[in-house]
Amino acid sequence: MAFTPLPGTKAPVRVWTDPYAIEPQAAQQLRNIGALPWVQGVAVMPDVHFGKGATVGSVIAMRQAVSPAAVGVDIGCGMSAVRTSLTAADLPDDLASLRSAIEAVVPVGFAKRDDPVDPRRVRGLEQRGWDDFWARFATLDRKVAQLESRARHQLGTLGGGNHFIEVCVEQDGPDAGQVWLMLHSGSRNIGKELAERHIGVARALPHNADLPDRDLAVFLAGTPEMDAYRRDLWWAQEYARRNRAVMLALLCGVVRDAFPQVSYGEPISCHHNYVAEEHYDGVDVLVTRKGAIRAGRGDLGIIPGSMGTGSYIVRGRGNPDAYCSASHGAGRRMSRAQAKRTFDTADLVRQTAGVECRKDAGVVDEIPGAYKDITAVMAQQDDLVEVVAHLKQVVCVKG
């Protein structure tokens, strides 16, 4: 579908869903964003919903400025996936042991590793750059210096909430039945700590005093505060990427142990909470994607649904109206608290039928019914991406 302008904004706010279907809180957030003097434009993805500071599912292009709340607190959160040589016929009827093997190798929830990951001991993991990466920890905000040990022990861990590891089966076309591995995670506690510290710094700056929402406070180019934020941001984005790379390599090892004949394609990886330097309409801008992926022409991306509805591998169409972006998933249609009030474990069992996963009260807030219809979300952005593969999970690991 083509975009619809959101009325009542100073900068253009282009919406890839029915603007009147956006929850009022989120619509007001988008108007607040569009009123900021540094904003070149905003693209609103079909999975849009209310978030802290900036709306989830928003792509914001700013001139000489960036808002840390428009990135989010899980800096660098994103997806990784790889296609395997296995087919559904290779998988056993009972997948409980495979799920258990994954959970034994990748800590989930608040868990951390007993010993930090040694890249040299992880088969298939990129070996370059690790020493330099960790050496740069000493350059980060001094208030997180005591968190280095925790950051090292959390590398290669999943986290909780909507983070997951899945074994999926391709649904359509000539490759139907092909098995994929997929995961969703971010920068763990260290990304959150860095984000919250910088959001606090931005809120206190004088030029942010009269904003409609102080959580939208920005850093300005050429200032020490901007330089410090970008230094920490780039490091946290790299931490998130390396975190996913470690887990994907470990996941491939688990599957290799179970199926020695397996081989793997080229992994796909994409952030969906991050900042990038880009150029549109003759203007250099800092683009924040909070709950959105880059979908430049030819870019491969991953758009998940929920723990019972499947996901999509996509190729970007490079639509400049959307700042070459697409949604990061289905997007929530109700809060976690509302999901717990609305559904129970019996609903969870029904909605995740055929998926080997947790079906207890601890993950009811992640029930598929709490999310928007991923099929409808994909239909609303057919001018942003083309579908490469439609996947359906058969194993889902959550924290």
Image: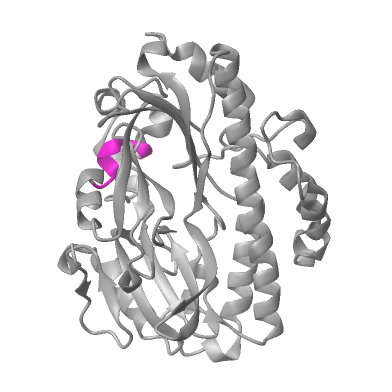
Q: Is residue 198 above or below residue 211?
A: above
Q: Tell me which residue sits at (17%, 64%) in the image.
A: 18
In the rendered image, the vertical position of residue 354 relative to residue 363, given as above or below: above
Q: Quadrant of residue 317?
A: bottom left
> Count the marks: how many?
0
Residue at the limit of the structure toward the front, as seen here: 174
Question: Residue 5 colored magenta?
Answer: no
In which quarter of the view is residue 341 placed? top left
| Residue 122, image x, y percentages | 72, 30
Residue stretch in magenta? 366-372
Which picture quadrant has residue 56?
bottom left
Residue at 68%, 36% (x, y): give it.
125
Q: Is residue 27 left or right of residue 38?
A: left
Lateral position of residue 138 relative to residue 40, left or right: right
Report the coloring of the rendering: one colour
Tell me residue 137's x, y (percent). 79, 58
> In the rendered image, is residue 339 in sight?
yes
Residue beneath the point at 66% across and 87% down: 222
Q: Position of residue 113 (x, y in %)?
A: 71, 33
Give the residue at x 56% y 48%: 186
Q: Quadrant of the N terminus?
A: bottom left
Between 122 and 154, the residue placed more toward the observer is: 122
Magenta span includes 367: yes
- Above or below residue 141? Residue 96 is above
Image: 213 above or below 263: below
Query: Does any portion of residue 218 appear in the rendered image?
Result: no
Which percent across, then down, holds residue 62? 47, 81
